[in-house]
Amino acid sequence: MALEALIKFLHIVLICLNKLQFKDFPNSLYMAKKYLNIFQPKMQLAVCNNCHKMHNIKDIIAYKKEEKVAIKDCLHEEFPNNPIPSRRNQCNNLLTILKKSKRETIAMPCMLFSKPSIRQQLSMLY
């Protein structure tokens, strides 16, 4: 918040000094980050539509069967320690869809969740 106020203050002062020279000076922290191209990347996770378990997107896209790109299923078990095997519900929902391009077939996640990194979350708090 202090950095945001400082950038707005500098914008007002510089515009008062010379409007033509400083017309492109950012007036918010968002615009400053955009001009400097310093946005922090967000971690993306693939989400199962059925059980809502989050999976690493790199593992899902790189999944292959017999050296070919294949559809990955969710392997989440609801009650893995249940002594009765019939009560261990495995999800088996599709996590990816296959898209064909001119040269190759690509596995695309059905549902994505963008999660900011821990550093970014802490910087937003303080």
Image (tube, helix red, strand yellow):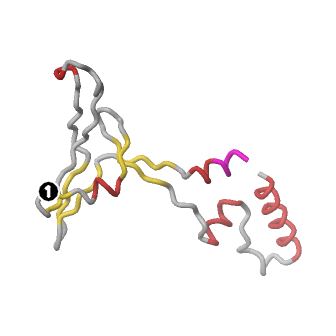
Q: At 43% across and 53% down in the image, what residue appears? A: 44
Q: Position of residue 43 (x, y in %)?
A: 47, 54
Give left or right: position of 2 versus 31.
right
Dominant SS of magenta comes to helix
Q: Position of residue 59 (x, y in %)?
A: 31, 55
Q: At 28% across and 35% down in the image, what residue appears? A: 76
Q: Is residue 34 above or below residue 91?
A: below
Give left or right: position of 38 versus 107.
right
Residue farthest toward the left in the current orientation of the protein: 66
Q: At 18% across and 58% down in the image, what residue appears? A: 64
Q: Position of residue 3 (x, y in %)?
A: 78, 58
Q: Secondary structure at mark 1?
A: strand
What residue is disc 1 on?
A: 65
Give left or right: position of 24 versus 65.
right
Q: At 71% across and 60% down in the image, what residue appears? A: 28
> Which picture quadrant has residue 22?
bottom right
Closer to the camera, 28 or 58?
A: 58
Q: Which residues are magenta?
A: 122-126
Closer to the camera, 2 or 66?
A: 66
Closer to the camera, 33 or 73?
A: 73
Q: Position of residue 37 (x, y in %)?
A: 59, 70
Indicate yes or no whether the magenta region holds residue 66: no
Give left or right: position of 107 versus 124.
left
> Which picture quadrant has residue 101?
bottom left
Instruction: Name the amino acid, label 1.
Output: Lys
> Which picture quadrant has residue 69?
bottom left
